[in-house]
């Protein structure tokens, strides 16, 4: 498996995990858009820092211990922000 294929599969799997968490635990979603945006900012900061946190460990351990959880959290926060935006525009069901 090439590096590009692995990155694509990892991102797709993280997206599926984020959608599952959103569907399975709807009570985790923040009630206000401001809190969802704060969660998103923290998630993307963690995603940026995950490469630095994993220095000194093997590449595979870094990916599954630091990058995958940060990516799932970032995508989950993206789902939350989009859900609040839909509600604000009156497009949600």
Image (cartoon, rainbow, N blue to C red):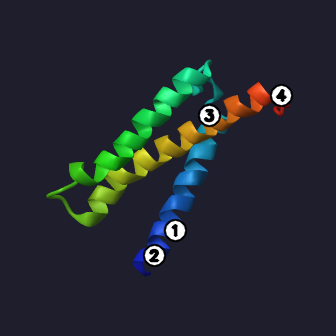
> How far, Cα to Cα, is label 1 from label 4?
33 Å
Which type of secondary structure does the marked residue at label 1 adopt?
A: helix
Quadrant housing the N terminus:
bottom left
Estimate how packed mark 3 is, as few (under 14), some (14 to 19) or many (20 or more) residues with alpha carbons within 10 Å. Answer: many
Please give the label number shown on residue 4: 2
Please give the label number shown on residue 90: 4
Earlier-in-chain disc, 1 versus 4: 1
> Mark 4–mark 2 contact, CB under 8 Å?
no
> Mark 2–mark 1 contact, CB under 8 Å?
yes
Q: Which residue is mark 1?
A: 8
Which of the two discs, 4 and 2, sits closer to the camera? 4
Residue pushed farthest left? 56
Left or right, residue 16 beside residue 39? right
Q: Nearer the viewer, residue 78 or 54?
A: 78
Q: Residue at x 45, y 71 (%)?
A: 6
x then y, percent, for residue 55? 18, 56
> How far, Cα to Cα, is label 3 from label 4?
15 Å
Q: Is residue 85 above or below residue 14?
A: above
Which type of secondary structure does the marked residue at label 2 adopt?
A: helix
Left or right, residue 47 beside residue 87? left
Q: Quadrant of residue 44?
A: top left
Earlier-in-chain disc, 3 versus 1: 1
> How far, Cα to Cα, is label 4 from label 2?
38 Å
x then y, percent, for residue 23? 67, 37
Q: Residue at x 48, y 41 (%)?
A: 73
Q: Nearer the viewer, residue 10 or 36?
A: 36
């Amino acid at each position: 498996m090439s590096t590009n294929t692995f990155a694509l599969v990892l991102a797709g799997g993280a997206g599926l995990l984020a959608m599952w968490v959103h569907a399975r635990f709807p009570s985790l979603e923040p009630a206000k858009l401001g809190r969802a945006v704060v969660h998103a900012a923290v998630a993307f900061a963690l995603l940026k820092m995950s490469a630095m946190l994993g220095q000194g460990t093997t590449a595979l351990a870094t990916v599954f211990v630091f990058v995958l959880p940060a990516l799932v959290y970032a995508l989950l926060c993206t789902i939350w922000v989009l859900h609040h935006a839909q509600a604000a525009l009156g497009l949600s069901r």
